[in-house]
Image (cartoon, rainbow, N blue to C red):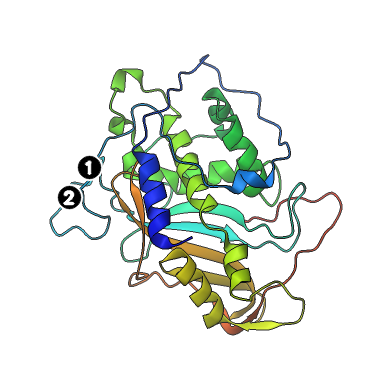
């Protein structure tokens, strides 16, 4: 998919009417159980934020590109973490219920404009019951998708989700409770739904496996690929910069393991447009791969658990 079309789809979704989602009770419990989902679940749906998400002007500044000072508490300008990384894993094993072509979702990270980052901030509350919150707001299809593509390496998937939101989501200023327009109807957890909905929606537009396959780069047990070819294929596909991470080897990883897609945001995280980044920032190139790397096939084993790291 051409980068301009990705931007149009993401932005159009943010302009749709808000989805009403009123809590049915005050308690949050009963974690959802994963169930199989069809391949069509990877089609990119238009994003519908919950009611109360900030409504922002069409001509607002792009994060990290404003020419005049922007107040740090602006609900229509992502600051200070305005460089968004959508991070994916290529795991060594096929996940239970998954496929040998699956790249999985690691997180959505708000790096600072120079490529460094904050973590475990206080812009939003922290939560230890992500699954229950998503159920509370009837986000069952979102949970089914996350249980297929956003997987922990041990323990329940919700452990990874809690880590990702508390480490990264709490550093996104537009998710602050004060940024939801109707303060009287605000209830804790609405920002959780918006964070995970936006992360998964962006992930659905970034089919890393097929982007590499179109460039003739497919998993192989012995073949080595030039790193520049992998990087070029993914950057042409996404329209922006991509950081590659590898494992194994000394003085540079020799086995492809991660891809980080870099974006800026025009507007709020909830309803804004993801703009592919053309630079990594002064400290943003965290790539550690050797010039030639392997892209190994996944192993199929019984009783699989997820491979994702925190």
Q: Which structural element holds mark 1?
A: loop
Looking at the rendered structure, the number of numbered marks drawn on it comes to 2
Q: Residue furthest left?
A: 68
Q: Does the rendering let one see residue 117?
A: no
Q: Which residue is mark 2?
A: 70
Vertical side of 68 occupied by 243: above or below:
below
Measure how far apart labels 1 and 2 are at the Cα level: 7 Å
Residue 285 in view in this figure: yes
Looking at the rendered structure, which numbered label has been put on residue 134? none
Q: Secondary structure at mark 2?
A: loop
**17 left or right, relative to 72:** right
Looking at the image, which is closer to me, 54 or 44? 44
Residue shown at 41%/56% (left/top)? 5
Which residue: 47% across, 34% down?
A: 193
Q: Residue furthest top?
A: 25
Is 173 in front, or is 302? 302
Residue extending furthest toward the right: 302
Is 260 drawn above or below residue 267 in the view shown? below
- Taking 304 as reference, is 181 left or right? left
Q: Position of residue 261 (x, y in %)?
A: 47, 62
Using the rendered view, name the quadrant where residue 177 is placed.
top left
Residue at 43% across, 44% down: 169
- Dots 1 and 2: beta carbons under 8 Å? yes
The x and y percentages for residue 254 are 64, 79
Q: Position of residue 10 (x, y in %)?
A: 40, 48
Q: Residues within 10 Å of mark 1 (few under 14, many from 20)?
A: some
Assess disc 2: are there few (<14), some (14-19) or many (≥20) residues with their C-alpha within 10 Å of its C-alpha: some
The residue under the point 76% across, 81% down is 222
Number of the label disc, if any, that sits on residue 74: 1
Nearer to me, 44 or 229: 44
Q: Tell me where residue 125 appears, x and y as whole percent.
A: 41, 34
């Amino acid at each position: 998919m051409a980068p301009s079309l990705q931007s149009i789809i993401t932005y159009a979704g943010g302009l749709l009417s808000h989805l009403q989602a009123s809590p049915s009770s005050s308690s949050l419990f009963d974690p959802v159980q994963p169930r199989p989902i069809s391949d069509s679940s990877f089609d990119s749906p238009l994003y519908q934020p919950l009611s109360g998400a900030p409504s922002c002007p069409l001509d607002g500044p792009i994060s990290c590109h404003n020419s005049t000072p922007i107040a740090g508490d602006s609900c229509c300008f992502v600051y200070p973490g305005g460089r968004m990384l959508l991070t994916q894993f290529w795991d060594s094993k096929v996940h239970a219920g998954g496929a040998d072509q699956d790249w999985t979702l690691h997180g959505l990270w708000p790096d600072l404009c120079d490529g460094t980052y904050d973590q475990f901030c206080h812009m939003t509350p922290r939560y230890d019951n992500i699954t229950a919150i998503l159920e509370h707001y009837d986000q069952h299809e979102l949970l089914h998708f996350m249980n297929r593509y956003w997987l922990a390496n041990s323990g329940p998937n919700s452990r990874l989700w809690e880590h990702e939101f508390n480490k990264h989501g709490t550093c996104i200023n537009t998710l602050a409770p004060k940024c939801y327009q109707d303060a009287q109807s605000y209830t804790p957890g609405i920002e959780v739904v918006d964070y995970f909905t936006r992360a998964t929606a962006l992930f659905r537009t970034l089919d890393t496996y097929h982007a590499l396959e179109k460039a003739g780069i497919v998993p192989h047990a012995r073949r080595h690929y030039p790193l520049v070819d992998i990087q070029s294929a993914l950057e042409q596909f996404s329209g922006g910069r991509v950081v590659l991470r590898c494992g194994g080897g000394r003085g540079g990883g020799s086995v492809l393991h991660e891809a980080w897609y870099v974006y800026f945001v025009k507007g709020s995280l909830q309803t804004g447009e993801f703009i592919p980044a053309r630079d990594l920032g002064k400290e943003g190139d965290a790539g550690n791969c050797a010039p030639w790397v392997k892209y190994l096939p996944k192993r199929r084993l019984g009783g699989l658990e997820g491979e994702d790291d925190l």
